[in-house]
Image: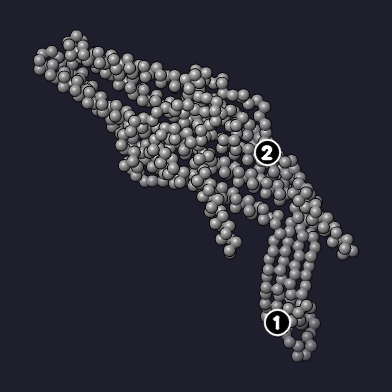
């Protein structure tokens, strides 16, 4: 009989790990994905100009501006940004939760030792059976026991939960990558806006000197009787208008510097020494590789997150199905027990127990069926959310390509407009000096030139921001950003494991 039970136990051990209830997860295939990005508006013209090509997405795209200040800021962002560091801790939390779930499927070992000294009462239970005269009512008991238990997980409930836990780790890793990509794009955008504002400040200061020179010219002509009070008032008004444009620009400059500082976990004005010196606007990207739609899921963190959520939901459906099946727990105890310390380790003091416990769900009041229906409904919702995420990702890329192409084309026209307005202004100044036109013509030409130059600086910034938005939509940049962070996390994880092993 014992031998038959032994072989039955061996058979159950062999089955454990082979049966796993529920469907194995496979990433959904999108059959209606676009074949390429060729249909985005005016992409063909943008391609001919060299702005957009079908090559691989550049994961270090900010380096193509060759701006050492920006490169250093990105390096510090990867190291110091609090959002990125918080997201990294969420990965560690998910790994901790995975360990807790996985521990259910691993045999547990425990040891306990005890010593008790007992004085029996003559008026308690012993009064029902009177002790022999002179019996000793005091005794000592020594116990030493090692216990082991193992949930055999015959139908894979724990393994499905572990699978879901691993998917949650992947989800948090994708979340961390999404945060890194978002903060990277935010930093570069803030830096581009800062340089654009500084370009406008520099432009306004140049016009400030120019309009003051024009005012001096009008005043000199007034003393000669060649200019009237109207022209003087117009010249003074132009000076005041130009002066009034500087305070809001400097306010924006300070706000953008503080914004970048917060991203680097720095107090206000900590970066003024590095960022206040005015530098020219960054050149526009020479070209942008957009890849192909089928590779987007490998780069976009939001698609990775949606895929991991769906994987976890599918595994949890399997765990809910496995809950309908019997659960077998193998437990045993081995130890010694004695009333005397002298024979505590004698063979006769040993005892042991060994055997499986079978739990069969018979009636749960609908809990198991309700849980399964809930998990299936959650899986269906997450599957729909996954498809929506993919569709929105394709739309983001297509919109970003169209926006960049259109801004590039508009920027070309604005640059030509600035050239023509500069010619008109220079001609008006020469004619005014010769007395051929009133100062109003100079004022108008100067206003048109300043306005077009401001629009040019703004469009330059918007075009560069469109490139950043395109890289954000393509999912490029987090790969380099997270390399240092993930290596640090792996190192911390290995160090913690070493400490746990030593303990």
Which residue is the extreme one toward the right? 1
Which residue is the extreme one toward the left? 224
Screen quadrant of the C terminus? bottom right
Q: How is the image coloured?
A: one colour
- In three-dimensional space, the C-alpha distance between marks 1 and 2, rounded to whole angstroms, equals 60 Å
Task: Please name the residue shown 20% across and 24% down the image.
Answer: 212
Q: Residues within 10 Å of mark 2 (few under 14, many from 20)?
A: many
Which corner quadrant of the image does residue 125 belong to? bottom right
Would residue 279 be found to the left or right of residue 374 on screen?
left
Q: Position of residue 22 (x, y in %)?
A: 75, 43
Q: Is residue 346 visible?
A: yes
Task: Please name the residue shown 58% across and 63% down the image.
Answer: 502
Q: Residues within 10 Å of mark 1 (few under 14, many from 20)?
A: some
Which residue is the extreme one toward the bottom? 134
Task: Please name the residue shown 48% across and 22% down the image.
Answer: 50
Can you identify the residue that label 1 sits on? 341
Is 423 drawn above or below residue 386 in the view shown? Answer: above
Contact check, label 1 and label 2, Cβ < 8 Å: no
How many numbered marks, from 0 up?
A: 2
Indicate the secondary structure of the residue bearing disc 1.
loop
Q: Position of residue 402 (x, y in %)?
A: 50, 22
Q: Position of residue 45 (x, y in %)?
A: 49, 17
Which corner quadrant of the image does residue 72 belong to? top left
Q: Earlier in the sequence, mark 1 or mark 2?
A: 1
Is 152 drawn above or below residue 369 in the view shown? Answer: below
Which corner quadrant of the image does residue 278 belong to? top left
Screen quadrant of the N terminus? bottom right
The image's mark for residue 379 is: 2
Indicate the secondary structure of the residue bearing disc 2.
helix
Is 466 drawn above or below residue 22 in the view shown? Answer: above
Task: Please name the residue shown 74% across and 72% down the image.
Answer: 335
Is 417 drawn above or below residue 166 in the view shown? Answer: above
């Amino acid at each position: 009989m014992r031998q038959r039970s032994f072989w039955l136990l061996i058979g159950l051990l062999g089955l454990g790990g082979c049966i796993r209830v529920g469907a194995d997860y496979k990433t959904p295939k999108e059959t209606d994905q676009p074949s390429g990005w060729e249909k985005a508006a005016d992409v063909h013209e943008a391609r001919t100009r060299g702005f957009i090509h079908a090559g691989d997405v550049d994961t270090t795209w900010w380096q193509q501006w060759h701006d050492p200040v920006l490169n250093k800021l990105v390096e510090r962002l990867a190291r110091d940004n609090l959002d990125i560091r918080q997201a990294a801790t969420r990965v560690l939390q998910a790994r901790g939760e995975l360990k807790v779930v996985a521990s259910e499927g691993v045999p547990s070992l425990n040891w306990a030792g005890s010593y008790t000294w007992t004085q029996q009462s003559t008026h308690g239970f012993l009064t029902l059976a009177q002790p022999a005269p002179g019996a000793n009512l005091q005794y000592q008991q020594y116990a030493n026991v090692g216990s082991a238990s193992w949930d055999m997980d015959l139908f894979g409930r724990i393994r499905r939960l572990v699978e879901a836990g691993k998917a949650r780790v992947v989800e948090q890793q994708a979340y961390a990558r999404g945060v890194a990509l978002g903060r990277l794009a935010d930093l570069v955008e803030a830096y581009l806006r800062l340089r654009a504002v500084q370009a406008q400040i520099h432009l306004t200061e140049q016009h400030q000197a120019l309009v003051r020179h024009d005012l001096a010219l009008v005043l000199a002509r007034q003393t000669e009787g060649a200019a009237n009070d109207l022209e003087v008032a117009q010249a003074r008004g132009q000076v005041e208008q130009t002066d009034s444009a500087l305070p809001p620009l400097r306010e924006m400059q300070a706000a953008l510097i503080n914004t970048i500082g917060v991203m680097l976990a720095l107090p206000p004005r900590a970066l003024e020494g590095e960022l206040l010196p005015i530098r020219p606007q960054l050149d526009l990207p020479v070209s942008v590789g957009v890849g192909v739609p089928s590779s987007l899921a490998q780069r976009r963190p939001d698609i990775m997150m949606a895929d991991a959520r769906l994987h976890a939901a599918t595994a949890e459906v399997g765990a809910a199905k496995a809950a309908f099946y019997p659960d077998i727990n193998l437990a045993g105890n081995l130890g010694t027990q004695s009333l005397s310390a002298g024979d505590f380790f004698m063979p006769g003091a040993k005892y042991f127990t060994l055997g499986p416990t079978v739990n069969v769900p018979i009636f749960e009041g609908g809990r198991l069926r309700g849980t399964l229906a809930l998990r299936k409904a959650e899986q269906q919702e997450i599957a729909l959310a996954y498809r929506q995420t993919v569709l929105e990702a394709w739309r983001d890329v297509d919109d970003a390509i169209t926006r960049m192409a259109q801004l590039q084309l508009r920027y070309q026209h604005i640059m030509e407009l600035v050239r023509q307005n500069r010619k008109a202004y220079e001609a008006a100044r020469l004619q005014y000096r010769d007395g051929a036109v009133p100062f109003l013509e100079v004022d108008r030409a100067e206003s048109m030139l300043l306005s077009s130059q401001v629009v040019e600086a703004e469009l330059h910034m918007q075009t560069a921001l469109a490139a950043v938005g395109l890289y954000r939509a393509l999912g490029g940049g987090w790969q380099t950003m997270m390399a240092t962070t993930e290596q640090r996390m792996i190192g911390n994880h290995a160090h913690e494991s070493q400490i746990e092993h030593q303990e």
